[in-house]
Amino acid sequence: MQAAVTLSEMGIASVIVEKEERLGGKLNRWDRLFPTMTPAREVLEPMRERVSASGAEVLTSRSVLSIEDEGRGVVLDDRTRLDADAVIVASGFDLFPAEMKEEYGYGLYDNVYTTVDLERMFREGTGIRTRDGRRPSTVAFLHCVGSRDEKVNQRHCSRVCCITGVKQAIEVKQEIPDAEVYSFYMDMRMFGPGYEELYRQAQQQYNIHFVRGRISEASQTIDGRVQIKAEDTLTGRPLKMSVDMLVLIVGMRSNASNARFAAGAGLGVQPSGFLAPRDAFLHNVESGVDGIFYAGAVTAPKNIGESLSEAVVAADRAAEYLKRA
C-alpha cells in the first residue's frame, strides 16, 4: 500500500494484487500496536484512504501464481497475466502454526491459545474469557513458539514476538487487574524505540512475572485448566503450575509462496525461507533480478514502521529502474 502511494506521488501508475478480501493484511486482525498501544485502525484507515486517493488499481481476493520475464509480468490465480515494467514483492510472512509444537497442546486443549487468538478477543471487545466463558485469574505466556527452534526448522529470531508478548500481557492486566500473569522466555530482545521502556513498565507498573525458562510440557487438568512444567533457569529450580490460560507467542515464518516466486523468476532464497535481497546494505530492497524489488517482511521479520520505510525505498528504486529501462 505504501509503495503504491509513493509511486503515485512520482506519477507512476500501479496495481495492488491482494489475496484477502480487503487491503491491510495481518493488520486487519490486530487491535492495538506496540509499543505505543495505538489502535491499529488509526494506522490502517488513513493508509486505505491514501491508496484510494492515489488512483492505484486494487485487485482483492486475487493471488499471484508466478512472476515472469524479470518483473515484466505476473500471472494471477485465474491464469490471467498482468503486464508490468517492474514488480515490488510485498507478500509479507506467514504465522507459525502452533499445532506443530504438540507438547503445548494447541488445538487439543481447550484453554491453549495463540497471540492471534488473544488479539481477536481484544479487537472484538468480548473480553478475555476461557473456553467455558470464565474470566481467567492466572495467565501464562510462552515466548519463541516457532522461533529459534531447530526442531521445526525455524532457526531465525522473529524479532517482534517479545514485544508482542509484553504488550498483550499488559493488556491482560489492564482488563483483569487482579490476574496473575507469567511470561516464560529464553531472553528478551527489546531492540526497538520504546520497547525496553514498555518491558520495564510491564514489570514495575503491572507486576507481570517474567520467568527465564522454557515450558517443556503442557497438559489439561480435569477442570479444564492447563498444567505446565518448566524450569526457572536463573534459580535452577523446576516449576509446575496450573493456569487458566496458556498463550503461545507464535513467530513469523517465510511466506509459503516464496519458493514458487523464486522458482519462476530466479530469485534467491535464504536458508530461513525468506527471499534474499541483493545485499544487506546498499541494495536491501533489490532482488538481484532486474525489475523485481522487495518491501517488508518478505525478506526477514520486520515491524510495521520498518516495512513502511522499506516500501518508500522500494518504490524509489523501482522508479529509478523505470527511468533507465
Image: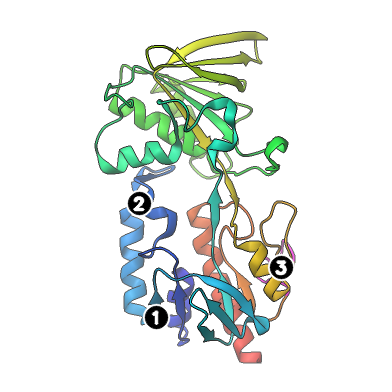
Q: Nearer the viewer, residue 21 or 190?
A: 21
Residue 9 x/y as whole percent? 43, 81
Q: Residue pushed farthest top?
A: 237
Q: Is residue 181 above or below residue 300?
A: above
Q: Is residue 27 left or right of residue 258?
A: left
Three-letter code, disc 3: Leu
Q: Secondary structure at mark 3?
A: loop
Of 242 and 131, the residue lying toward us: 131
Tag of residue 282: 3
Other-residue count near label 1 (Cα within 10 Å), few / some / many at <14 / 14–19 / ≥20? some
Crowd rating for badge 3 (residues with CA inside 10 Å; few <14, some 14–19, many 20+): few
> What is the three-letter code of the residue carrying label 2?
Ala
As drawn, 249 above or below 294: above
Separation (CA) of disc 1 from disc 2: 24 Å
Q: Which residue is disc 1 drawn over?
A: 57
Task: Please indicate whether residue 223 sits to the left or right of residue 231 in the image.
Answer: left
Magenta segment: 279-288
Q: How many marks?
A: 3
- Mark 1 vs 3, N-terminal side: 1
Colour option used: rainbow
Inspect the image, locate mark 1, and give the three-letter code of the amino acid beneath it.
Glu
Disc 2 residue crowd, few under 14, some 14–19, many 20+, Cα 10 Å: some
Tell me the quadrant of the picture where the C terminus can be found: bottom right
Check disc 2 and report the residue beneath it. Answer: 40
Dot in front, 3 or 2: 2
Q: Are marks 1 and 2 in contact (CB under 8 Å)?
A: no
Going from the N terminus, do you reach mark 3 or mark 2 first?
A: 2
Q: Judging from the image, what secondary structure is the residue with disc 2 in?
A: loop
- As measured in the structure, the alpha-carbon distance from the residue carrying label 3 to the one carrying label 2 is 31 Å
